Image (cartoon, rainbow, N blue to C red):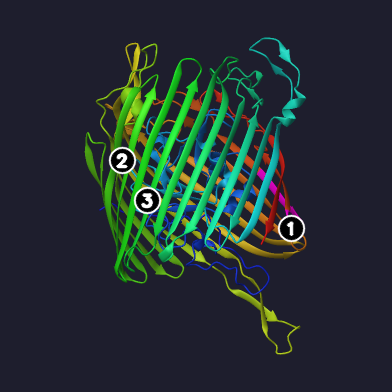
Amino acid sequence: MLAVLLLTANISFLAALDEGDGTNSLGADNFYDENFDDYLDFGEDAGLTVSASRETTQQMEVLTREDIEKRHAPDLAALLEEALDMGITRYGAYGSQTEINIRGFDTERIAVLIDGVPANSPRSGEFDINQIALSNVERIEVIYGGSDTRYNVSGALGGVINIITVKKQEKGLRIDGSISNTGYLPGGYNKKQNGDTGEAHPEDIVDTQRMHLSAAYGAETFSWKAAWFGNRAANHYLYRDYSGFARRKENNEILDTGADFSFTRNLPGDASLLASAGLYYADKNYPVTGTSRGRAKEYDFSVKPNIMLNMPRAFHDDLSAEASLSYTWADMRYGDISHSSDQYITGINRWSWYPADKLTFRSGLDWRFIHVDSTEDGLRNGNNGGLYATAEFKPTATLLFIASLKGVTDTRQGAAVPKAGFVWQAADWFSLKNNYFRSFKFPDFDDRFYHSADGLYTGNPNLKPEDGWGADLGGEFTYTGGETRSSDPAEDSGAVKIIRHAPAFNAGSTVYVQWTTDSIHWVKQGTRWSPENIGTAFFTGIDIRPALTVPLSFLIFDRVKFGLNYQYQLSRLLNDDLNFSDTLRIPYMPAHIVGASIDLSWKSGEPAAGSLVLSAHWESVRYADTLNRMELEPYCLVNVTVNQSIGKNLNVFAALRNALNQLYTSFAEYPMPGISLTLGGQIQITKP
């Protein structure tokens, strides 16, 4: 049996006590923040869309609303890179195509959920991060490894990202608004290689503007929230091309906007009904190549209505249920040569049965009906989904076993996807986790049916599913610190007042191993490109994340948090006649990632407060091709964000990204922006 060493990471730092009675402290057993129940949709353990995972045998990281607001990241990928040191591959600044990497797997092999509902495109397998406005996100959960048992969705070879956008609204009316400007350092540049020079463009100081406005209202039996966002990004930053000439990015302009609405209603028997809808539109210019002055035009439009029902007591006290029905229409036009109109309906039904204190049974069904009409794929219909059953057994208060089996099918073929794991709270300060799982993914529509107008790219309808297995083992060490007490002179009785906690320390890591076969890659056969099941790969690695929180009583400073992260991944391509001795790595996967962060907070009066977040993210050498001949240099990104509240309603912020002005390439021959400065403000008005 495979055994692997781990310490599971928890990037949500343990909160040190504010001065006072200590009721805001998070103990060792409280993984989530004190408002956890807000995400449970009026039920203790249910809530398809707004629930956070209570307990999982897998490594899991959580970003709260506070984490998101402190960093003011431009998009989801930048947030995950800064806060969790996740690997990101992107073709440029905001609005460009972006891949998120977990344990060596890209976005097409990561299950992205919005409020618990799968959001990956069934045509391409990708997920457009620009359609998610971070101003509307309440919480983000990242579950590492394949075959997650909480949501049990197919295609999660690398893991699951669950983006939670809705929660119970507090009673009363709340209005939020924000606006910001991002500027790049202007300077002289070459208009083309060895060509005429261009003067500095002062307008690059006002390159990108972002706006957000939302209103929310909570009552005794219902609540609603409406939000709108808009972005203008010229993306006119300076860079150096592969010949060393200074250039200015052009023809990469983005205009996009979106709106979201949700309504929650209490029903009899503690049940609740949630209806939501999302709208997104984008007008994008794409450079033909990373340094080209030519461009292609793209228009994106999507509509996503959704309705969800949660019954924490379904017909019986020991039975709960949740159901969701969602519809997506995504329309994309790329120049005059490509047009696609994707429509799909996703239905989900999950049940939980609690026959005894130590035993829980869960089961569920998810199914997706797909209609694709595109220039490349033609008119196609399809469907896929699966049925799962999970058993959770807790023989003691410190030990939990979880076993799950899911049957998946696309009506042409099927497979059984098992998973087993456990959590052992060995001591108050240490816990252990272990998992064994199969990972499985059906081919996407583009892989099967894509056909370019010039006939150079043709899909393969005979592709086999991607298959594999994996395991991880780990633990977490937690020290919450003791209390520092002193007599309160204001109390004649000599009562004791808690001043603050001692420093809190949290350290964990995860060691994992995964093997995949029949991975799908596009290969050139003569003059034509076609996808084939040629990928076989092996991954193993370790993820270490210590964190320290220290209360402060110096001037206005309240506390400081230190975080470190080290990730090592050994990957090997084993296609055809390759073996371990060939030492060929997976493209775009660095062997080493190192991250560090400092979060300093202060109080400058009541209710004024502020914070400074300093983070660094370093990646080692990567390769852009399977033969490891095209080497991409290491790079280090340093980001600094300062927040300061002014009064009860106003917050101003400044964010300096790539503060070292690192010139680097994320995707081959697509240079990334240098130093940028974002200035903005946010206003919040609350009326009880």
> Is residue 383 at least partly visible in the picture?
yes
Q: Residues within 10 Å of mark 1 (few under 14, many from 20)?
A: some
Badge 2 is on which residue? 515
**Residue 181 in the figure: left or right of residue 68:** right
Looking at numbered disc 3 in the image, what kind of residue is underneath it?
Tyr
Q: Nearer the viewer, residue 529 or 6?
A: 529
Query: Residue at 66% across / 51% down in the picture?
Result: 175
Q: Tell me where the magenta segment starts and ends, as one range.
A: 640-649
- The image quadrant of residue 449 is top left
Is residue 16 toward the left or the right of residue 90 in the image?
right
- The circle drawn on residue 151 is 3
Magenta region includes residue 398 = no
Viewer-nearest residue: 507 or 517: 517
Residue 185 lies, with reference to residue 61, above or below; the image says: above
Q: Which residue is mark 1?
A: 648
Q: Is residue 329 above or below residue 532?
A: below
Q: Is residue 655 left or right of residue 632?
A: right
At mark 3, the secondary structure is: loop
Tell me if residue 641 is in the magenta stretch.
Answer: yes
Where does the image place residue 31, in percent across and percent down from the top left? 49, 62
